[in-house]
Each structure stands twice: as C-alpha cells, then as structure tokens.
Amino acid sequence: MSNLTYLAAAYAFLWIMVFGYLYRLARRQQAMEQELRALQETLEGTRKEA
Amino acid sequence: MNKPGYAWLPWLIGLTALSIVVSVCLVFVYVPTERVMGPVQRIFYYHVPSAWVGFLAFFVACLAGGAYLARREIRWDMLQAASDEIGVLFSTIALVSGSLWARPIWNTWWTWDPRLTTTLVMWLYYVVTLMLRGTVESEERRARFHAVLNIVGFINVPLVFLAIRLWRSIHPVLFTSEGFALEPSMLLTLGVCLLAFTLLYACLLALRVRAQGLEHRLLELRQLASLPESEAKGETL
C-alpha cells in the first residue's frame, strides 16, 4: 500500500465512525420519540376514560 | 432539535461543522508535507485530537461520576454514560489511525510500546465498563457502579499521557519542556483540529445526553402504562 492509501484509510475510518455513531443516535432517537408519542396518547386516553 | 434547554444546539452544530471544514482545508491545502514521512504524516492532525477527545471524555465521565456519588441526581449518570461512550468512540479512532500511521513509518501495525499498551488497556477498561453497565438492572445501582468504575478507571488516563516520559518509547513526544516540537503552520493546523474535535465532542455529548433523557422519560411512561388504571390516573404526564 502507498502512503496515500494509509492516509485515505485513516480519514475514511474516522468519518465512518463519527457519522455511523450519529446515524445510530438519530435512528434510536426517532424510534424513541415515536414510542413516547404513542405511550402519551395511550395514557391520555386512559385518563379521559377514567 | 429546538426542545427546551437545547435551543443552543443548532448553533453548536453549525460552529462545529464550520470548524471541521476549516480544519480539512488546513490539513489538505495549507499545511506543508512533512519532509521525512511524506503525506501519511497528515494522519497526525486527526490522530492527536482523537486521543485528546478520548482523554477529555473520560475526565468528564470521572467528574460526572463523582457528582453522581455526591448528589445522586440521574442527570450526572446520563452525562457519565454519554461521555464514556464518546470516549470509547474517539479512543478507537486514535488506536486505529495510529496503527495505520505506524505501518508505513515503523513497519508494523502494532508494537507493545508503553504508550500503545496503556492506551489499549484504557480502551479495554472503558469498553468493559460500558458492557458491565448494561448488565445492572436497578437504575440507582447501575449509576453508582458506573460512577465508581469511572473514578477508579481514570487513574490510567494520566498514565497514558505520561507513558512516553516515564518509560522508553518509540512514540514521538509532542509537548516537550521547551514547548511544542512543531513548525508554526503545523502547530496552527493542530490547534484548529483540536478545537474542531472538542466542539464535535460537545455536540455528540449534548445529542447523546438528550437521547438518554428521552430514554429515561420513556422508561417512566412504560412503567406508568403498565400500572393499574387507578394508580396511573393520579400521575401527571
């Protein structure tokens, strides 16, 4: 491998890790927000019925 | 994005993005190519800031652990867990980028040098800490256990920094008693990269803590939803 290949590999690894982490965080947050909304609606419904 | 308490987050993200763009320009356009190592030396400008963010994240986790033990507030536990996770991420980047730099320069992917070995021990410790955290069910016990591990584990962090001064090492020494062993343009580039990575750490930390707050709220609501109707209606949303 040439010097430039090592350089490209190091930078690629860095940004894949950072953006991969951000993507995972965003996906998890989206799923949690959806579940939170659904749970809030369920609990609101239970309260109204009561 | 603009939830109460996080109105400043878009500004922080913008500033981080700007500093990263500036750092990329400096690394690939402004700074001269190092004479002996050639272009591969440019790994240095992100390798050092990655290691710095790792140290910073573990330091913040240690402080948050201490604050949790003193106050028993869940927000400190969220901070220590988030900071450890980001610390592990950046320590992984530092280890891998160092290995990719070592291959053409030292002619090996890995050597049991004091700096490399102590860094690997630090990385393993925090990976195991995060794994063990996941095994404790009680929220209070988990937070206390994690706080103790963070405080004890931080003993190794200064050792990683001092390893190249305490023992014979092939790892270069950047900060000497006579100042920085760097040419001014390289020092400026490194400074901007350090700033960009510190801002990136702050961004990721804020996003992760916010996600943990959401996770905590979700857990509370799940428990509330599973309660009998008579108990649930007394609770506020």
Image (cartoon, rainbow, N blue to C red):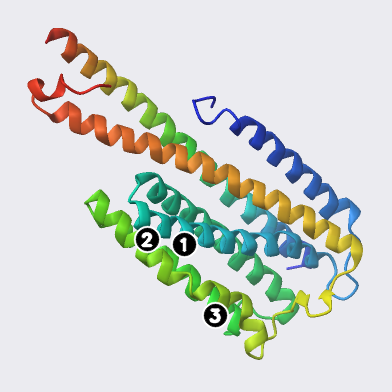
Quarter of the picture containing the N terminus of chain B is top right
Question: Closer to the N terminus: mark 2 or mark 1?
Answer: 1
State which quadrant residue B163 falls in: bottom right
Q: Which mark is residue B185?
A: none
State which quadrant residue B149 falls in: bottom left
Quick check: marks 1 and 3 in contact, CB under 8 Å? no
**Residue A24 appears in the picture as rendered:** no
Please tell me whether mark 3 sits on a helix, a strand or a loop.
helix
In the rendered picture of this protein, how many numbered marks are placed on residues?
A: 3
Which-is-in-front pick, marks 2 and 3?
2
State the residue position of label 2: B147
Q: How many angstroms separate mark 1 from mark 3 (CA)?
A: 21 Å
Direction front: furthest residue: B70
Q: Residue B41 or A36: which is nearer the viewer? A: A36
State the residue position of label 3: B117
Quick check: A45 left or right of B90? left
Q: Residue B24 location in percent, x, y?
A: 79, 49
